[in-house]
Image (cartoon, rainbow, N blue to C red):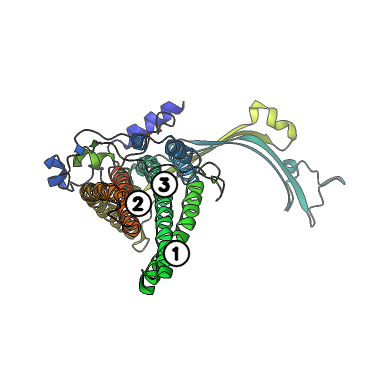
């Protein structure tokens, strides 16, 4: 029966669906899409081919993998996006149900006192005796009525407004799935960035502590030389100031370690401090793979969840125009009542007391002082805004990808230079150690060269961490990090 009603409704509205049909999104960034490559993809580490959905696994860090998986399964932001999907699905089900008739079981009892005479037979009273009825000289008779039955109503979708509503609800459900994917992309990138920042700060704290140790040794030696008259007070004060500055730099690093641990706890759905024990042991900064697949601009536009969300919002706003236009057209509603009833309780069981009533109702807002036209114009303006927002999302996605690729390539070149400087400083420190062992170099010179080596190591470590951060930004810009859940939760 339900399928028959759906087919009947579809047949009625097939030739008169109001509003424009959705013809797809406007063409945006066509030059980039047809070019086949990104403009800023000039680094040799960037390769063709599709990216990996679980890109964080390429960093080869088991702790990071666990944190991302826990975040994707326990973050409140993911739970909120999933709740929005359930809400959109419920609205779609409501829209489909509105295409069908509504039936309700009814039961009714009426007791009334009506003025005048001659109604005793109807009400079961008798004006001649001393019962409920009273004399005709001035009173009323009782009326009792019992009825049990069903009421049915149906409003045919003459101009396809309800069908457009179903279409808009379906598009909104698709949009909510894209929003969930976008939340997964952002969350996985945030977890990875916070984790890399944590390991970077730990490494800097370790190197700074080593630098403080060398500076303290140099200061102690300078005090000895000052006492022996072979060093000046100026040299001692300069070393003292340098040591105090290095020690001061270590203080905020301790706070930053706590901040990044708390950020990871919240991202995984925990309270601040709950991951301290898990992250107590330090670890090196994970590095990106030697080859990074990035795909092409056309794949980016099709894959980015925020672009897909904007496109589905455009489709929904287009369908909503038809909803508003149909509301300005004539409508008909059929209401019916079928039941058994009479003046006695037993009448509801007598098939001879069957009564049926059909009430068609025609409505048409012929005079609404422009309200209908205004609502249609409002819907059209919303469609135009959604179209502009889609264009903006595509352009922003292309810019995001190009900028992240440019930063990644620049950081790789910078890291190559700083790695060379770190290696040169290490060789210089090794050569000077040989001179110091041979007695041709002083201890103060050796300590100074070792401090320079540490400075080069700190700069290279920061560049390595920045390279991983830029790699994460590339993956996020490419729209990677989400999984399609429609296999478990189909839209239709």
Q: Nearer the viewer, residue 465 or 47?
A: 465
- Above or below, 368 relative to 113: below
Category of crowding for the residue at label 2, using alpha-carbon neighbours closer than 10 angstroms: few (below 14), some (14–19), many (at least 20): many
456 or 473: nearer the viewer: 456
Q: Earlier in the sequence, mark 3 or mark 2?
A: 3
Residue at x-position 48% and y-position 56%: 254
User: Quick check: can you spot residue 38?
Assistant: yes
Q: Position of residue 486 (x, y in %)?
A: 39, 32
Q: Earlier in the sequence, mark 2 or mark 1?
A: 1
Mark 2 or 1: the one toward you: 1
Residue named by callout 3:
199
Residue lying furthest bottom: 233
Q: Which mark is residue 248?
A: 1
* SS under mark 1: helix
Q: Which residue is mark 2?
A: 324
Q: Position of residue 27 (x, y in %)?
A: 18, 46
């Amino acid at each position: 029966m339900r399928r028959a009603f759906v087919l009947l409704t579809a047949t009625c509205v097939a030739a008169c669906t109001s509003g424009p049909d959705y013809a797809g999104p406007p063409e945006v960034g066509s030059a980039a899409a047809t070019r086949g490559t990104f403009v800023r993809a000039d680094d040799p580490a960037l390769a063709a081919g599709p990216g990996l959905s679980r890109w964080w696994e390429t960093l080869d860090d088991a702790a990071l993998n666990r944190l991302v998986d826990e975040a994707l399964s326990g973050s409140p932001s993911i739970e909120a996006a999933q709740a929005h999907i359930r809400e959109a699905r419920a609205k779609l089900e409501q829209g489909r149900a509105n295409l069908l008739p509504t039936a309700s079981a009814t039961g009714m009892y009426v007791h009334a006192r009506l003025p005048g005479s001659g109604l005793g037979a109807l009400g079961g009273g008798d004006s001649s005796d001393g019962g409920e009825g009273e004399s005709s000289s001035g009173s009323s008779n009782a009326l009792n009525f019992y009825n049990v039955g069903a009421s049915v109503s149906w409003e045919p979708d003459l101009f396809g407004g309800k069908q457009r509503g179903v279409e808009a609800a379906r598009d909104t459900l698709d949009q909510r799935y894209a929003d969930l994917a976008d939340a997964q992309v952002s969350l996985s990138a945030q977890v990875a960035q916070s984790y890399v920042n944590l390991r970077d700060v730990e490494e800097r704290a370790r190197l700074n502590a080593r630098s403080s140790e060398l500076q303290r040794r140099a200061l102690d030696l300078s005090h000895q030389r000052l006492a022996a008259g072979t060093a000046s007070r100026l040299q001692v004060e300069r070393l003292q100031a340098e040591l105090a500055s290095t020690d001061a730099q270590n203080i905020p690093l301790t706070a930053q370690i706590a901040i990044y641990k708390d950020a990871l706890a919240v991202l995984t759905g925990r309270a601040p401090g709950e991951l301290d024990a898990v992250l107590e042991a330090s670890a090196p900064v994970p590095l990106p793979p030697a080859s990074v697949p990035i795909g092409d601009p056309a794949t980016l536009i099709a894959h980015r969840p925020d672009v897909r969300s904007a496109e589905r919002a455009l489709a929904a706003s287009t369908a909503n125009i038809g909803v508003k236009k149909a509301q300005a057209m004539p409508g008909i509603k059929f209401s019916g009542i079928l039941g058994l009833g009479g003046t006695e309780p037993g009448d509801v069981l007598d098939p001879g007391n069957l009564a049926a009533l059909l009430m068609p109702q025609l409505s048409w807002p012929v005079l609404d002082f422009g309200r209908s036209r205004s609502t249609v114009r409002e819907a059209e303006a919303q469609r135009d805004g959604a179209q502009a927002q889609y264009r903006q999302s595509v352009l922003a996605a292309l810019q995001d990808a190009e900028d992240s690729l440019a930063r990644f390539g620049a950081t790789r070149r910078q890291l190559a230079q700083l790695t060379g400087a770190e290696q040169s400083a290490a060789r210089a420190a090794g050569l000077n150690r040989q001179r110091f062992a041979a007695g041709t170099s002083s201890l103060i010179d050796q300590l100074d060269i070792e401090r320079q080596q540490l400075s080069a190591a700190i700069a290279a470590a920061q560049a390595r961490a920045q390279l991983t951060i830029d790699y994460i930004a590339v993956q996020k810009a490419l729209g990677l990090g989400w999984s399609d859940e429609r296999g478990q939760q189909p839209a239709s």
